[in-house]
Amino acid sequence: MSLYITLRQLSIFEAVARHGSISRAAAELNLTQPAVSMQVKQLEDQIGLKLIEQVGKKMCLTDAGQELRVHAARIALQMGELAAAMDQFHGLERGMLRLAVVSTANYFLPERIAAFTRRYPGVRISLAVVNRDSVLVALAENRTDLAITGQPPQAADVIAQKFMDNPLVVIAEPGHKLANVPRIPLSRLAQETIVLREPGSGTRATVERYLSEHRIAYRPGCELSSNEAIKQAVQAGLGIGIVPAQTIELELETNRLAVLAVEGFPVMRHWYVLQRSDKRLSSAAEAFRSLLLEESTDSDLIKLRPGDRWLSGAQAELKSGY
């Protein structure tokens, strides 16, 4: 059987299969819905099989469609390998770098991207800022070259490299009754309402795991989709929060938030840059990964509260319960 199908048709079909939607695939590919539908129809005609069927209001892949999706994803990975190989001949005079990062990385990543673009002005950067689950999906589906998250997956097909400290601290409004207590037992958190990130957030997963390990039952408050929203909720008196220290420097300087001296905190996490183990990185991706790894973790200083001395990540970890 001869198949006269194009890479473009496979790429469009893969997007439709991944999203389960013609409209969302069209939006990702910057095409019209009729154009996407036409390409899928032409692909079905070339193969001679139905690939997609409508079940009620839901679009589903047929058995043939499921099989084609596996091969389309494999071919997309190979085309990425080819593009990376060809990029080596161009060096870093041009190219594309795709990054998928968790939202908290926005507090430090722009400086790194700016440093990268100064070195390599010909490289274009595509940046997706989403939660941890979405970052890992983008990596698994080969829609990003590198991913940045505070909690790498336990997967053999992912290479995770630590490049910076990411301590979590407990915050409250400055007028909170615990704000000036010099040492707060960890068990005291059971009496407080804690404003949380949404399910799928790496910060939330770490907090829940840490409190569970210490057998602390807490009162959950609002579930919010960003650290900015958590800071606003805490300032409004809706509860205490647990956030990365990098996100609150401005609020500490302006005395809009206070860090509570809870025993066991800061909880030390780290930032990781991830790549697929089976993916050959382009020159641009390799250069950006190297830039991140060049920077020493110990040189990243976190100021825990106004008036306190600056602590390195290593010192903050040793000063747990500070």
Image: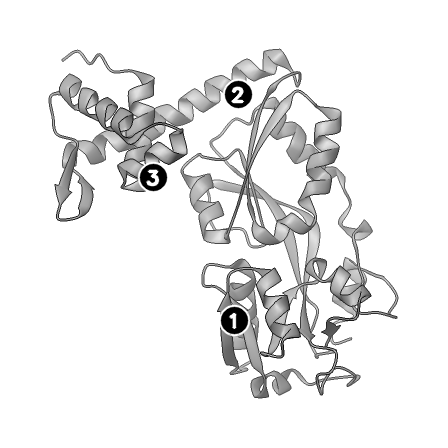
Quarter of the image for residue 20 reads top left
Q: Which of the pair 153/196 is nearer the observer?
A: 196
Q: Which mark is residue 20?
A: none
Which residue in the structure is indicated by mark 3?
24
Is residue 209 visible in this depiction of the protein?
no
Q: Position of residue 47 (x, y in %)?
A: 15, 20
Q: Nearer the viewer, mark 3 or mark 1?
A: 3
Measuring 21% from the left and 32% from the top, which residue is drawn there? 67
Earlier-in-chain disc, 3 versus 1: 3
Q: Is residue 271 above or below residue 187?
A: above
Task: Identify the amino acid type marked 3.
Answer: Arg
- Secondary structure state at the residue bearing disc 3: helix
Q: CA distance from mark 2 to mark 1?
A: 40 Å
Q: Position of residue 95 (x, y in %)?
A: 58, 20
- Secondary structure state at the residue bearing disc 1: helix
Q: Quadrant of the N terminus?
A: top left
Earlier-in-chain disc, 3 versus 2: 3
Q: Nearer the viewer, mark 3 or mark 2?
A: 3
Q: CA distance from mark 3 to mark 2?
A: 27 Å
Which residue in the structure is indicated by mark 2?
84
Crowd rating for badge 2 (residues with CA inside 10 Å; few <14, some 14–19, many 20+) = many
Task: Identify the amino acid type marked 1.
Answer: Glu
Which residue in the structure is indicated by mark 1?
208
Task: From the viewer's perspective, tell me whether residue 246 is left or right of residue 58.
Answer: right
**Dot 3 and dot 2 residues touching (CB under 8 Å):** no
Q: Position of residue 208 (x, y in %)?
A: 52, 71
Crowd rating for badge 3 (residues with CA inside 10 Å; few <14, some 14–19, many 20+) = some
